[in-house]
Amino acid sequence: NAGVTQTPKFRVLKTGQSMTLLCAQDMNHEYMYWYRQDPGMGLRLIHYSVGEGTTAKGEVPDGYNVSRLKKQNFLLGLESAAPSQTSVYFCASSNPEGAARETQYFGPGTRLLVL
Amino acid sequence: RKEVEQDPGPFNVPEGATVAFNCTYSNSASQSFFWYRQDCRKEPKLLMSVYSSGNEDGRFTAQLNRASQYISLLIRDSKLSDSATYLCVVNPPDKLIFGTGTRLQVFP
């Protein structure tokens, strides 16, 4: 049981390049989330999904797009990377049943540097 | 005002010490409360939930004061392995709000 995995672990991009971050979970969780973590800012929600085929905006969605074509995968896309998107990106998942919904399981993170 | 506020620390304490962290939140409609632990360059992991009556898990005690809108975490008999950043997490309806974390460094 791998839990939540993220690909890649580290990436360097030039301004204007695009990339996709992949998140996969094998816990059969309905809910999935993408966060970014910056020094002094805490974790901020970018987008989330409450089920296959559904997505919604979080606190800081601008410059990102997401897709949830399969229940176990949640993709985060950067169409035109900017230096302000340099951050550590965490994916998380949770089960929607009762209190379990509020316990989020995180992936190991993707460190992104945009030059 | 930030929705969740924590003292960033660092708290530098010797092994065996007792240390307490506080966290305040602004949304009175918040329903659930948690402490997560995050090791350096790692992902956050749930440490414990915080219940209205207070709860204890080994050396860790969490308390909630709804009237004053603050949450606390007490660590007794600190171990070197407790060195980490502790994130206060609050659940207003339909989302989780993470504090920026309090860093704890336990030294021999």
Image (tube, coloured by chain):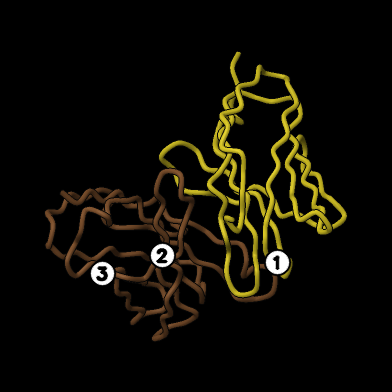
Chain colours: A brown, B yellow
**Residue contact at pointers 1 and 2, CB within 8 angstroms:** no
Identify residue for label 1. B30
Q: Residue sitting at 73 percent across and 41 percent down?
A: B73
Give the labeled residue for mark 3: A77
In the depicted structure, whether residue B22 falls above or below residue A58: above
Q: Report crowding for label 2: few under 14, some 14 to 19, many 20 or more residues within 10 A (C-alpha).
A: many
Cβ atoms at labels 3 and 2 below 8 Å apart: no
Whether labels 1 and 2 share one chain: no
How many discs mark residues in the rendered view? 3
Q: First in sequence: mark 3 or mark 2?
A: 2
> Which residue occupies 46% across, 44% down?
A40
Q: Amino acid at mark 1?
A: Ser
Q: Tell me where residue A67 sits by quadrant.
A: bottom left
Q: Is residue B95 left or right of residue A69?
A: right
Residue at 87% x, 55% y: name it.
B53
Q: Nearer the viewer, residue B51 or B27?
A: B27
Residue A66 in the figure: left or right of residue B26: left
Q: Residue at x 25, y 48 (%)?
A: A10
The chain carrying label 2 is A
Q: Position of residue B15 (x, y in %)?
A: 67, 18
Mark 3–mark 2 Cα distance, whole angstroms, equals: 11 Å
Give residue A86's position: percent from left, percent from top.
27, 51
**Same chain, marks 1 and 3?**
no
Circles 3 and 2 on the same subunit: yes
User: Mark 1, chain letter?
Assistant: B
Q: Amino acid at mark 3?
A: Gly
Residue A34: assigned label = 2
As drawn, the residue found furthest toward the top would be: B108
* Callout 3: SS: strand
Secondary structure of residue under mark 1: loop
